Image (cartoon, rainbow, N blue to C red):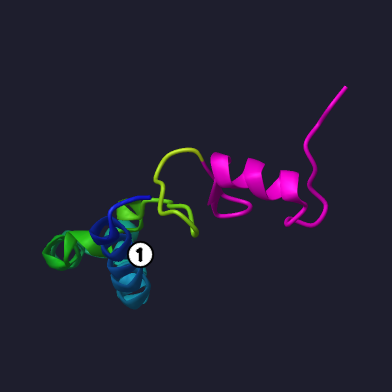
């Protein structure tokens, strides 16, 4: 199990990212718009850099929804490789089974 503080931190970051997403996209569109004057683009860049760091989507760390493990997480299931194997062996994930030949 991951530390509870790590799991809670990841949840908090996801919440901040989702709340600031629209504003961030609008500012990025202004920054990358070549038709605007340089002063407006620079002002948008300053506002973007003044936003909290945790509002960036790259700050999100994928974690297992069951254990909180940060590494080896399958995006399709949002669970770690260890839990995926255990649950697939027990038949808890529909359409997934352990390969054998």
Q: Residue furthest top?
A: 101
Q: Residue furthest right?
A: 101
Towards the viewer: 36 or 97:
97
| Residue 80 location (% of width, % of height) | 53, 45
| Residue 74 location (% of width, % of height) | 57, 45
58 shown above or below 49: above
Q: Is residue 88 left or right of residue 62?
A: right
Q: Is residue 50 left or right of residue 23?
A: left
Q: How many marks?
A: 1
Region rendered in magenta: 73-101
Towards the viewer: 24 or 9:
9
Q: Is residue 84 magenta?
A: yes
Give the residue displayed 29% in from the left and 71% down from the top: 16
Q: Is residue 75 left or right of residue 25?
A: right
Give the residue displayed 34% in from the left and 67% down from the top: 11
Res. 81 in view: yes
Q: Residue furthest front?
A: 90
| Residue 30 location (% of width, % of height) | 30, 66
Quadrant position of residue 85? top right
Crowd rating for badge 1 (residues with CA inside 10 Å; few <14, some 14–19, many 20+): few
Give the residue displayed 19% in from the left and 59% down from the top: 53
Q: Where does label 1 land, which residue?
A: 29
Res. 34 in view: no
Give the residue displayed 32% in from the left and 56% down from the top: 32
Q: Is residue 100 left or right of residue 86?
A: right
Quadrant holding the C terminus: top right
| Residue 31 location (% of width, % of height) | 27, 60
Q: Is residue 60 magenta?
A: no
Towards the viewer: 51 or 94:
94
Q: Secondary structure at mark 1?
A: helix
Quadrant position of residue 40? bottom left
Quadrant position of residue 12? bottom left
């Amino acid at each position: 199990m991951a530390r509870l503080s790590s799991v809670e931190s990841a949840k908090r970051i996801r919440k901040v990212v989702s709340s600031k997403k629209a504003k961030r996209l609008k500012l990025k569109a202004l920054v990358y718009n070549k038709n605007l004057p340089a002063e407006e683009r620079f002002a948008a860049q300053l506002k973007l850099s003044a936003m909290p760091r945790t509002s960036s989507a790259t700050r999100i760390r994928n974690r297992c929804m069951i254990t909180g493990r940060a590494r080896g997480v399958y995006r399709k299931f949002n669970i770690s490789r260890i839990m995926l194997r255990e649950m697939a062996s027990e038949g808890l994930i529909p359409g997934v089974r352990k390969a054998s030949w």
